[in-house]
Each structure stands twice: as C-alpha cells, then as structure tokens.
Image: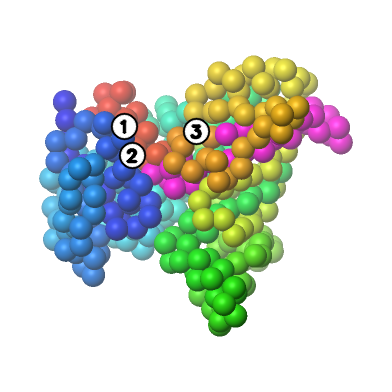
C-alpha cells in the first residue's frame, strides 16, 4: 500500500531533508506534495530524480494527503495543522507549538512509540526538540535497566538549528572577518563566528532560556515525569550537528560495562568509544547519518551511581526530519493508517 504525503516547509533546510529521507528510506508514496507559503509557491525542489513544483499551502486541500510533515514554523503549524487534521490528514509537526499539548503525543519512536495511540485526539503528532531527541534515544534503554533520577546536560548546538539564514550568517561573518569587512548579527544576540553563545530562544523569568525549558518539559513528557533535568543550551559556530555533554545519576548502581553492552544493542544508537585509539565522534563526522552517536563513556565519581557521556547527532536528520519520517513509518507498522 502507498500513501499521499505532503511536506509543508519544503523549501527550508528541514523540509529538504524530509524529502531526501523519504526517498532514501523508500517510503511507500503514491503522491508527494511540496508545500510552502505563497511567496515560495512556484519554486522547484528535488525529490529523488524528480523535480516538484512548490504549491501554496493556502490553496492546498489536505484531504488529498494521508500524512503531512510540517516544518514551516510554529505560527504556520498553529493555523494549518488543525485544518489538516480536521480533513483526515495526520500531521507530524516539527515545531514546538503542540509539544506540550496534553492531547497531542510527543514521540521519539525508539523511546515511546506507544504514545502514538493518542494521535486520533487531534490527528496531530508532535516531533520533539532536536536536542531532546538525541539525548533520550540512548537514555531510554538505560532508564529501563536502572531508573534515572537526574540529568545535567550542556548542549553545543549548530547554527542549522536556527534555520538556513543562520547558516548563511555564520558563513558571511566568517568570510567578512578574514576580509576585514563589516560583521552583522541578525539571527543571534552576538557574533557567532569564532564564538559560542549561551543563549538559544528567549530568556525566561528564572534566567533559563526557552530552549533549556523545552528539554526539561519534553524529557518529563516523553521519558518519565519524575526525572529532574538541568540544561544549559549553547550555540556554537558549527553548520550541522548537535553535541551534548550528558551527566546521568541513576537510582541504583550501573556499571560502565553494562552501559556499553546496552548501548551497543540499542536501536538508533552507535557506540563509538575507544580512548586507546582516540576514537570518538564529533559533529562533523555525524552529518548525513541516521544514528545518535555516543562516546566518552565514564563514571562520574562525584555522585552515587553517576555516568558521563558525549552524545552527537545530525540535528537536521535524527533531530528533525528523520524522526518525523520514522513516526510516519511507525504509524504504518502499527496499522494506524
């Protein structure tokens, strides 16, 4: 059986990856529709060896699609996801708008696929934040063995997480510095070239940022509401690939050998960790890969039952587009569609 698929935000970085991954994974497609705003209508995007003409979302009838992958911004999803859902189209939304809606499942297929059963509430499924996804994929099988009490995570997030214009800004700033030209910061609060910025999204009243709060709230909704999470989210001058330093405190003792054995067999995880040969993963090596990579496994001797790890993944893929496509695949596997 094949399905009619719409991709809203097809001209953006994540939309491009959605189309690429649908083709790479040979998703069973009958018709594919590339959608965007009125100003992008008429542009062309690639889908395998085909060229698709982008359609104006305002003129598209969502009853023609079985599944729609959304990645065009929260304000767009706020308007169009309910419209699509009411017309019988299942929306997999990559924005933050519906993530904390109690009637909308927030899903990482390797972590909580059973939550998909609630998609019928609104015909909308939320895709989590990119940093939350890659953190929870390796933590889920560990949590099943020994309950996680607390997580302390520091992220090192690439500029592609802020969109194509942010990638362009890093490129332009880097070039302009070498040619002694004017440096402009439009997407970030400070210069991003040759710098790191401990500020992603808006600041909240308690001094944390909205990005950090997302990681806290989403971890509780997806994995376990009792887990305490402390997050510091940092933007770094890397084009693609997020990295995280993750400290985990478990309720009971868990050995490094047990962690290695579990992660070696965990779905979606690639354990690359050999200090004798300086073997570990960095963001540049994860680009275009489907896996969540784990390196630098070690005991934290400062707390009981503590483990440290380094987690890296392509934020445009597993952190966004791939997870959305996997959700669609899971819907089919569970015969929900």
Q: Label 1, on which residue?
A: 25
Question: Residue at position x 56%, y 51% from top?
Answer: 214
Q: Position of residue 124 (x, y in %)?
A: 32, 44
Membership of 311 in magenta stretch:
yes
Question: Residue at position x 54%, y 78% from top?
Answer: 184
Q: Position of residue 175 (x, y in %)?
A: 54, 71
Q: Position of residue 189 (x, y in %)?
A: 59, 72
Q: Label 2, on which residue?
A: 21
Asked if residue 65 is positioned above or below residue 111 in the image, the reply reads below
Mark earlier in primary sequence (1, 3): 1
Instruction: Give the spatial CA distance, label 1 vs label 2.
Output: 6 Å
Q: Label 3, on which residue?
A: 291
Instruction: Give the spatial CA distance, label 1 vs label 3.
Output: 14 Å
Q: Which residues are magenta?
A: 293-321
Where is residue 218, by image quadrant? top right
Residue 277 visible somewhere in the drawing: yes
Q: Callout 3: 10 Å neighbours few (<14), some, many (20+)?
A: many
């Amino acid at each position: 059986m094949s399905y009619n698929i719409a991709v809203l935000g097809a001209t953006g970085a994540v939309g491009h990856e959605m189309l690429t991954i649908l083709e790479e994974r040979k998703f069973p497609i009958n018709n594919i529709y590339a959608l965007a705003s009125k100003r992008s209508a008429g542009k062309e995007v690639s889908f395998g060896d085909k060229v698709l003409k982008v359609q104006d979302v305002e003129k598209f009838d969502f009853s023609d699609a079985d599944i729609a992958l959304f990645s065009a911004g929260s304000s767009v999803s706020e308007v169009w996801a309910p419209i699509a859902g009411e017309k019988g189209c299942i929306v997999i939304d990559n924005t933050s708008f519906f993530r904390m809606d109690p009637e909308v499942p927030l899903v990482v297929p390797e972590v909580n696929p059973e939550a998909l059963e609630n998609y019928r509430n609104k015909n909308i499924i939320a895709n989590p934040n990119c940093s939350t996804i890659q953190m929870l994929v390796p933590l889920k099988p560990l949590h099943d063995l020994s309950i996680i009490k607390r997580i302390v995570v520091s992220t090192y997030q690439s500029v592609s997480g802020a969109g194509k214009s942010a990638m362009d800004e890093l490129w332009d700033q880097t070039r302009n510095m070498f040619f002694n030209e004017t440096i402009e910061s439009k997407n970030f609060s400070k210069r991003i070239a040759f710098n790191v910025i401990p500020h992603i999204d808006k600041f909240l009243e308690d001094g944390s940022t909205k990005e950090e709060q997302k990681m806290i709230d989403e971890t509780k909704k997806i994995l376990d509401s009792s887990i305490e999470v402390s997050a510091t989210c940092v933007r770094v001058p890397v084009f693609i690939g997020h990295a995280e330093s993750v400290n985990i405190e478990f309720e009971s003792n868990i050995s490094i050998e047990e962690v290695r054995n579990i992660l070696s067999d965990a779905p979606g995880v690639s354990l690359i960790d050999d200090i004798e040969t300086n073997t570990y993963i960095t963001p540049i090596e994860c680009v275009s890969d489907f896996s969540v990579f784990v390196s630098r496994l070690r005991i934290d001797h400062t707390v009981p039952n503590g483990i440290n790890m380094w987690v890296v993944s392509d934020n445009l893929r597993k952190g966004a587009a791939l997870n959305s496509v996997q959700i669609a695949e899971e819907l089919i596997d569970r015969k929900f569609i």
